[in-house]
Amino acid sequence: MEYWNNMVQGIMADTLLRSYLWACLNFVGLIFIFALAKEFLVRYLGRVAKKTATDFDDFLVTLLSKIHYFVFLVVALYLAILPMGFSLNVQNGLRHFVVAVITINTVILVEMIMEYSLNKIYRRRIKQDEQSIKLIVNSISSILKWVIWIF
């Protein structure tokens, strides 16, 4: 009987170790894939954007490059440990953390889009010097950032 107990415990420990190793491998692999995809897209789109006359595509490349690697880490961690079957509380806590990180990064990107749009609108409509446009855009941008973060 003791032989069977030791065998079952050995199999369970081996399975647990294997699932942790698989999760670590998935985590590292996903981070590598996300980082590689980001670098490839930024470089490729950057080369394409240099050939165009507009600055909107340059802005999109800048926007894409501003996605933080921390977002990749958090998403990779979530995807790597999701199949491991942790308790519902752990899964919900991690899910809420992932949503919070993605939301914060999205709000930062929305702020950048808003600031770019304000610059474009005021440069096109107001024929004043650079300093006054910068002052107007900074003032409106500050107010809108507060509104975005509050809501």
Image (cartoon, grey):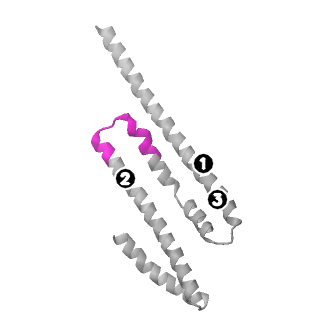
Indicate whether 44 appears above or below 56. Answer: above
Give the residue drawn at x 69%, y 60%.
47
Q: Position of residue 63 (x, y in %)?
A: 55, 64
Q: Quadrant of residue 99?
A: bottom left
Sequence-wise, the earlier of marks 2 and 1 is 1
Q: Which circle marks residue 36 in the picture? A: 1
**SS label for mark 1:** helix
Indicate whether 89 appears above or below 4. Answer: below
The label nearer to you, 1 versus 3, is 3
Tell me where the magenta segment starts and ends, as one range: 76-92
Give the residue drawn at x 33%, y 43%.
91
Label 2 to label 3: alpha-carbon separation:
31 Å
Q: Which residue type does callout 3 highlight?
A: Leu
Indicate whether 53 appears above or below 130. Answer: above
- Residue at the extreme bottom of the image, as rendered: 128
Q: Position of residue 83 (x, y in %)?
A: 39, 36
Indicate whether 24 appears above or below 1. Answer: below
Instruction: Tell me, yes or no, whether the highlighted magenta stretch contains residue 23.
Output: no
**SS label for mark 2:** helix
Sequence-wise, the earlier of marks 1 and 3 is 1
**SS label for mark 3:** helix
Label 1 to label 3: alpha-carbon separation:
14 Å
Q: Quadrant of residue 124?
A: bottom right
Q: Position of residue 122 (x, y in %)?
A: 54, 84
- Tag 3 residue: 45
Give the residue drawn at x 49%, y 54%.
70
- Main SS of the magenta part reads helix
- Tag 2 residue: 97
Image quarter where the C terminus lies is bottom left
